[in-house]
Image (tube, rainbow, N blue to C red):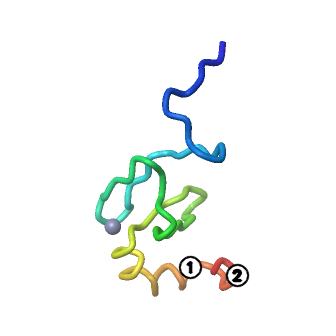
């Protein structure tokens, strides 16, 4: 039996809590658009704005340019 979500998210997008992989900052409503998502070893990792900026070079080095 499916029960309605007591806190429905707009546009049907399921927000999942994400944690910055570098500094541990939590975003309980899902990754903000300013956060960076990086796929490493098949698992997604998120970086907050500050950490994404700090890791930008490292992330760019691992991803294809088409990702951006
Ligand atoms: Zn961070």
Q: Nearer the viewer, residue 16 or 41?
A: 16
Q: Nearer the viewer, residue 42 or 32?
A: 32
Q: Secondary structure at mark 1?
A: helix
Q: Position of residue 57 (x, y in %)?
A: 46, 87
The quadrant in which residue 14 appears is top right
As rendered, which of 55 and 12 lies closer to the eye? 12
Residue under the image location 38 percent in, 61 percent down = 21
Mark 2 or mark 1, which is nearer to you?
2
Numbered circles on residues, count: 2
- Can you say which quadrant of the picture contains the C terminus? bottom right
Give residue 66's mark. Answer: 2
Q: Which mark is residue 47?
A: none
Seen as rendered, the residue at the extreme right is 66
Residue at 46% in and 68% down: 35
Q: Residue furthest front?
A: 10
Residue 48 point in image, percent of width and height: 39, 68
5, above or below 53, in the image = above
Q: Residue furthest top?
A: 1
Cβ at disc 1 under 8 Å from ligand 1: no
Tell me residue 12's x, y (percent): 65, 43
Tell me which image quadrant ligand 1 sits in.
bottom left
Q: Residue at x 44, y 48 (%)?
A: 29
Label 2 residue SS: helix
**Mark 2 and mark 1: span between their CA atoms?**
12 Å
Give the class, few, some or many, for how many residues have Cα within 10 Å of label 1's Cα (few <14, many ≥20).
few
| Crowding near the residue tagged with mark 2, few <14, some 14–19, many ≥20 C-alpha atoms within 10 Å | few
Q: Is residue 20 left or right of residue 35?
A: left
Percent position (x, y) of residue 54? 36, 82
Quadrant, the N terminus: top right
Q: Residue at x 48, y 58 (%)?
A: 31
- Residue linked to disc 1: 62
Position of 17 with respect to 22 (left or right) is: right
């Amino acid at each position: 039996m499916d029960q309605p979500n007591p806190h429905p998210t707009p546009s049907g997008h399921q927000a999942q809590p994400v944690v910055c992989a570098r500094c541990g900052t939590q975003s309980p409503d899902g990754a903000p658009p300013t956060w960076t998502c990086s796929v490493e070893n098949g698992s997604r990792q998120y970086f907050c704005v500050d950490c994404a900026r700090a890791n930008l070079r490292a992330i760019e080095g691992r991803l294809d340019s088409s990702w951006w």
